[in-house]
Each structure stands twice: as C-alpha cells, then as structure tokens.
Image: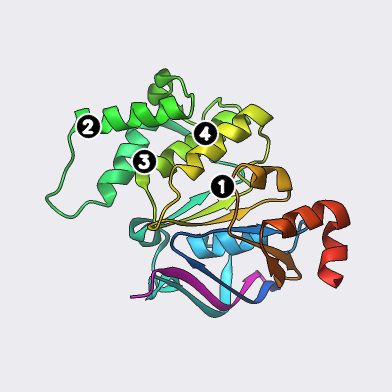
Amino acid sequence: MKASLEIKDLSVSIGERPILKDFSLTINKGEIHALMGPNGTGKSTLAKALAGHPDYTVTGGQALMDGQDLLALSPEQRARWGLFMAFQYPLEIEGVSIANFIRAALQARLKEGEDFSAGDYYKELYAKMDALKMDRAFTARALNVGFSGGEKKRCEVLQMMMLKPAYALLDETDSGLDIDALRIVAEGVNALRGPDFGALVITHYQRLLDYIVPDFVHVMADGRIVKSGGKELALELEKHGYEGIAQA
C-alpha cells in the first residue's frame, strides 16, 4: 500500500464556476509541502474539496489516501481514516467543551468495544496544552466561543496533536497570528513531523515557513501548480512576487 496522499488531475467547481483544473500533487508520509499563491487561485478550494465540503463539486480526477479512494468517503469517514483539516476561520460551537469535543473525536476512531481511560486522556491533553502554552482552564470552555484568532488556531493545533492524523491540511493557519503565537503554533505542527505524518501547509506568507520548514514549495495559479521547488522558492516569492515567479 502506497503511503501517500495522491491527487491526480483533480478538477473542482463551485456551482458552475471551475476553480481547480487538473490539479496534481503527491504528498508522501514524512513530507511537509507548502502551497502558495494569490487569492482566488484555488488553494482553500483544494483543502475543502479533499475534506468533503458539500459546496465543492469534484468534476474530474482522483484523490487517493494510502491507495484508497478518498473521494468515495463521507467527510466523517475521511476524518476517521486520518485526514485532518485546520480551517482558516475555525467554527465556534456553543455548548460543547474543548475536552469533550476532542474526546468524542478520539472515541469515534476506536473500533467497537475499544475505549481509553479518562486519566490517560487528560494527562496527554494537559501535556499538549502546556506545550502550546494554553491555560488548562480552556478544557471546560465551549469550542472557540469567545476565543481570539490566536486562541482558535492553538485550539485547532491542539486537536491535531491529540488526533495524530496521517495527513493534515492546514489552511492559512498563520492568519491573524502575532509572532509569538505563530512560533508556538508552528512548534505544535513540528512536533508531529515524522515518517507517519504528511502535511500540506497553505499560506500567503514566507514567514510561516521560517518556523515550519517545508520539504517542497508549490506556487499555484489559475487552479493548478505552475512551479515547484524547495524552501528557496518561498524566498524568491518574497523578492519577485507571484507574477514574476509564475512567468519565470
């Protein structure tokens, strides 16, 4: 079985408007890929389509996760298989505490008859919160309700660290973060790096990539990748802009 998230000639529309056009990318486990590009090129569309958002219609191509047809699964099944998405604008959920939300997500992945102890769960949860410099009192607060932008992003990274997904789609996780919060969130992502984890980091800015150093950088335009390279490609973007890179 191939340990990769493989996207082959994927085309996606919103209503009658095509956004992704024969988009192809392979993310092997153990790799971090950064996807950059101007607004409106399809970066967030890619993440939401892979996660199974109902507003995004796949009109062609494939997406395989470890050799299995990702697009044939419901959003819930994709998550259980190990796909995680961090949203640019995390949702607020009244009446559901952070602790109960993450615990329910973990339990949903267990096989019938399996369980885990509350003591072990909270021990790990608190350790992850301490690493993200989150007040432990947040466990009792409703998910993202009344949170600042930085607190919401830390909460999403906390969920990811607890769920330990096989693949993560991080849609502008750096949006709205100050320098200190950016560094802390990046450390949480980096803690998952290893042979059993692959990630796609969607961002506009090179600054995030100073903390989460990617193995590959891709530039997107008009619904497809127009250039790929290493970390140095992000530095070129800072100097020349997207248009200069796409035409080079």
Q: Distance between the residues labelled 4 and 2?
A: 21 Å
The residue carrying mark 3 is 162
Q: Which amino acid does label 3 sit on?
A: Met
| Magenta span | 1-16
Magenta-drawn stretch contains 10: yes
What numbered label is drawn on residue 35?
none
Number of residues whose C-alpha sits closer than 10 Å to that of mark 3, classed few (under 14), some (14–19) or many (20 or more):
some
- Say which amino acid is labelled 1: Phe
Which residue was labeled with disc 1?
87
- The residue type indicated by label 4 comes to Arg
Q: Position of residue 223 (x, y in %)?
A: 71, 70
Q: Where is residue 109 in the image (x, y as percent from the top left)?
A: 27, 52
Residue at x 36%, y 28% (from the top left corner): 127
Secondary structure category for the residue under label 2: helix
Q: Tell whether label 4 touches label 1 (CB within 8 Å).
A: no
User: How are the colours assigned in the image?
Assistant: rainbow
* Image side of residue 127 versus residue 84, left or right: left
- Mark 2 residue type: Asp
Q: Earlier in the sequence, mark 1 or mark 3?
A: 1
Q: Mark 2 points at which residue?
A: 120
Helix, strand or loop at mark 1: loop
Earlier sequence position, callout 3 versus callout 4: 4
Q: Residues within 10 Å of mark 4 (few under 14, many from 20)?
A: many
Calculate the distance from the C-alpha at mark 2 to the C-alpha at mark 3: 12 Å
Tell me the residue at 11%/50% (across/down): 113
Note whether 73 is above or below 93 in the view shown.
below
